[in-house]
């Protein structure tokens, strides 16, 4: 989207769509490189966060069954909400502050990881301090956030380009 014909509503919609697509990619990534041990994932960070907000465990751990698997729908709401929000932030902020698009979003993704997984979530007690998290968790989350935001970048660029035609 060029500066002359920037449309905030379009940027938000495109960023939201990109965030949903990239959210699926991040879920797939975590199936290949699980960030947490099964014990630590018994109550995952989105569930812990919701419980910190006072939402009862009966809701935070609620599931639906698909193909014999119990799927945590409440966690998915947080996961996709986070992803869509950051897709929108990147879509809009990238227009006004193009430097955040350096590395096609990978550096922004690294920054989101550091801010949330090293800073904010440990400070809130949602996850252990960064030094107390296993190295496998850092590897999965660092690379996963970089891939996640790269997908946001690619989808945003493509949809913005199509919108201009």
Image: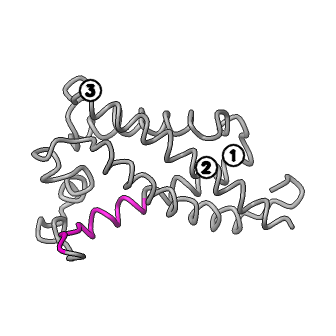
Label 3: state its secondary structure: helix
- 97 w.r.t. 41: above or below: above
The residue under label 1 is 94
The residue under label 2 is 90
Q: Residue at x 52, y 62 (%)?
A: 21
Q: Residue 69: within the magenta? A: yes
Q: Residue 31: within the magenta? A: no
Q: Quadrant of residue 128?
A: top left
The quarter in which the C terminus is drawn is bottom right
Give the total of numbered labels. 3
- Upstream in the sequence, badge 3 or badge 1? 1
Q: Quadrant of residue 79?
A: bottom left
The quarter in which the N terminus is drawn is bottom right
Q: Residue at x 24, y 49 (%)?
A: 45
Q: Residue at x 27, y 55 (%)?
A: 46
Residue 70, x across and y down, in percent: 18, 69
CA–CA distance between discs 2 and 3? 28 Å
Q: Residue at x 39, y 48 (%)?
A: 29
The residue under label 3 is 135
Q: Is residue 87 left or right of residue 44?
A: right
Tell me the magenta residue range: 68-81
Between 39 and 98, the residue placed more toward the observer is 39
Residue 124, x across and y down, in percent: 25, 41
CA–CA distance between discs 3 and 1? 31 Å
- 117 w.r.t. 91: above or below: above
Labelled pair 1, 2 in contact (Cβ < 8 Å): yes
């Amino acid at each position: 989207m060029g500066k002359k014909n920037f449309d905030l509503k379009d940027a938000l919609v495109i960023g939201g769509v990109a965030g949903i697509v990239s959210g699926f990619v991040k879920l797939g990534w975590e199936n290949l490189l699980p960030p947490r041990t099964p014990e630590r994932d018994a109550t995952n960070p989105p569930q812990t966060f919701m419980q910190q907000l006072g939402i009862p465990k009966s809701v935070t751990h609620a599931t639906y069954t698909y193909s014999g698997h119990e799927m945590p729908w409440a966690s998915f709401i947080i996961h996709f909400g986070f992803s869509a929000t950051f897709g929108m932030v990147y879509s809009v902020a990238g227009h006004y502050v193009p430097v955040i698009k350096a590395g096609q979003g990978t550096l922004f993704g690294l920054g989101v990881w550091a801010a949330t997984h090293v800073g904010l979530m440990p400070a809130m007690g949602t996850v252990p301090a960064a030094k107390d998290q296993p190295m496998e968790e850092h590897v999965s989350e660092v690379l996963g956030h970089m891939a996640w935001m790269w997908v946001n970048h690619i989808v945003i660029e493509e949809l913005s380009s199509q919108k201009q035609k």
